[in-house]
Amino acid sequence: MSVSTRFVRARARVALLLLVAIAGTALVFAPGQAAEASTADFRAAVAADHPAAWWRLDEASGIVAGDASGRTAGTYRHGPRLGDPRVAAGSTGTAVGFDGVNDYVGIASTRALSPRRTLSVEAWIEPTRLPGDGRFASIVSKRESWSLQFNGRRLEFTIIQPDHTRRRLQARAGAIVAGGSYHVVGTYGHGVQRLYINGRLVASRRLDTRIRVNRNRVTIGAWGGRQEFFRGKIDEVAVYDTVLSPTRVDVHWIAGSKPHKPDSRDPNPTPSPTPGPTDPGAAGDPGASPDPGSSAGPGATPTPTVDPTADPTSTPPGDPTPSPTDAGTPSPAVPTPTPTIAPTPVPTVAPTPTATPTPRPTPTPMPTPRPTPSPTPTVAPTVAPTPTPRPTSSPTATPAPTATPAPTPGGTSGPRKGMAAHFMWQPLSDTNADLDRMKAAGMSYVRFDVSWRNSEPTKGTYQYLDKLDQVIAAVQAHGMQLTMTVIETPSWANGGAGMFAPPTSASDYASFMGVLARRYASRPGMVWEIWNEENDPHFWTTGPSAAAYTTMLKAAYTAVKAADPDATVLVGGILFNNTAFLEGIYSNGGGGSFDGVAIHPYTINRAPGDTTSAYYGFKNSVPQFRTTLGNHGQASKPIYITEFGWSTANVSDATRAQWYHDAVAIADGWTNVPGLGAYTIHQSQFAEYGLITTAGALTSSWTAYAAAK
């Protein structure tokens, strides 16, 4: 299947819940509800995500740049050209032309425009001239805080830290050309900085910091109103104090790039003034979302001593182009927009160890699930299929009697080789294509994630389980052994503390695990991983706690075994060689509540055979965890490596290709290690870890891993 065909088919599946209440001339959206991408107009899509400010720039005269959110109007300075033809085809208004000399829009600072931890900036642009090398042109910025701009010919999204350090993320030169029309979005928060063009992720990297807060005004078309003036048209500028999810970015692009169809019912819609949810994926997005916590808050991990993406300078944006190490990881150039270009969701999350006495380097993040919406409801067959599944009543089944733990797999030399994937993020056709490719490469193991938050949006109602049915069936039809990690807390289960804050009551998570285990009890070989990297503050935002995790593990284990005595229950993937966390589970009485242990022995920039670090080692990972299990008389329990790998932000693809080969050779000498999951399949789902490019080409790492015996 061609890339463009996959994009079109993926786009056809993008559907989000629309709830529109007509009140006078306003569209009012309840928090978390969003427009259906293929039919709703751009205005509704933006309004659904509750921008902190939204300057539509559609005035025909005057000096006031209205804010459609009703909060912070701006002022046109030095006579920019009003009433130009719109850039966003789906918009009903006009755009503003800037001369690149001295005109701009000035907006007073507000708290919502000065977020510390999460930010999204969006605009539609049609530049008529790009700056030369070493020069800048600002689209929208807040001086000494953040900026969406051009750095030479490269689109750049910059976050400025409290110490004035610039964190620049760039697209490739040529991704935007003068005369083209583009939708551009920069997002930051929860450990990841991202840049999109026309709905497609073009650059991303790990970044854990705070945004510098100040009282400088926001300016459109200039940096501070004094320099770096933009030449061309700007349209529909919005700033959010939340993180727009990849799916929501795509919804905005789709709606905005489609020609507007007048709607007599709604001549002038405006967003509800009610702030949107802080959960960046809560706007009806069925996918998982970035970590709503912040490593800059309580329980945060210290700034790592090694940060390959750091910009050591603190120069103003007008200074020369930053070093390549601070430019993020751009993807190939993006053409002038057409509605057939579709993005692929990108996840977040990065391993950051929590139990070590000294600061240590932090790897580039791994994603968090962002499943593709399921096209039909999960339960209640009387409900007709709709583009977006609606929650239905809880599945009912007679609970199986409590049983003793099932025998655990293992005992043979060498693990099943496979991938850590994100099958719930993508269409089933893409999943089958991935499984075909894996099988052809001799792989027979896969681990993927399931979102509790998306599957049980309100207590006792379930959705997307029909898609999970299909994915599990596809995996097993390909002869693969599977492991599923169940993560993300729905807001009803923890008071809205964020998807990676644990539930207030472990019984709620256990109840959902029981639903899943009961649903698939008739299928052989079900392996459930309880949470993911619970020793990392990105996935346990209240602060990693072996005691709290053990409470949840015990409850989940009991529920799963009651529903399916033959299922295997694993401790969630422990990040790095943090055997102390496993000791903590034993100390809190959890030794009888798991059948095996999942581990994630990332080494950052060390070869798999390097044993100089006990904490960041691949070769010494299984032996160390085996020793800990043995110390408690459980050395026979299996150890699954459900994630491992290397980021090209830290090593070259040629280097990691050799390392993947070496890692398989090392793992082949281990016993009772049923699965080995390389992270991850697609660069489109995470650029720096993926083994298949956005164009569908196999990297050297894929080839080497597939060939390794």
Image (cartoon, grey):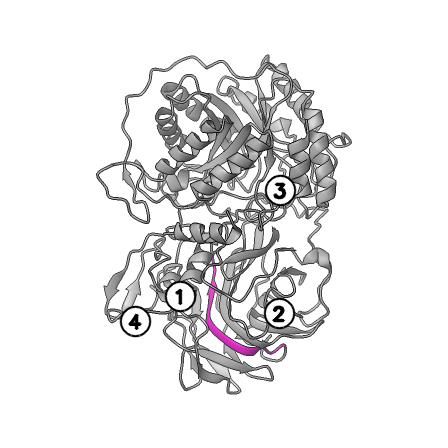
Quarter of the image where one finds residue 620: top right
Residue 510 at what x, y percent from top left? 39, 28
Determine if the magenta segment contains residue 237: yes
Going from N to C along the chain, the mark reached first, 2 or 3, is 2
Estimate the spatial distance between the alpha carbons at disc 3 and disc 4, rounded to whole Å.
45 Å
User: In front of the other: label 2 or label 3?
Assistant: 3
Going from N to C along the chain, the mark reached first, 4 or 2, is 2
Residue that label 4 marks: 262
Estimate the spatial distance between the alpha carbons at disc 3 and disc 1, rounded to whole Å.
33 Å
Return the residue nearer the eye: 495 or 35.
35
Highlighted range, magenta: 228-243
* Furthest residue in direction left, as rendered: 382
Left or right position of 89 against 620: left
Residue that label 1 marks: 258
Above or below: residue 219 compared with residue 170: below
Estimate the spatial distance between the alpha carbons at disc 2 and disc 3, rounded to whole Å.
30 Å
Residue 691 disc label = 3
Left or right position of 513 against 234: left
> What amino acid does circle 3 point to?
Leu
Estimate the spatial distance between the alpha carbons at disc 4 and disc 2, rounded to whole Å.
34 Å
Residue that label 2 marks: 150
Circle 4 sits in a helix, a strand or a loop, which is it? loop
Q: Quadrant of the C terminus?
A: top right
Confirm or deny contact between disc 2 and disc 3 (CB under 8 A). no
Other residues around mark 4 within 10 Å, as few (<14) / some (14–19) / many (≥20): few
User: In front of the other: label 4 or label 2?
Assistant: 4
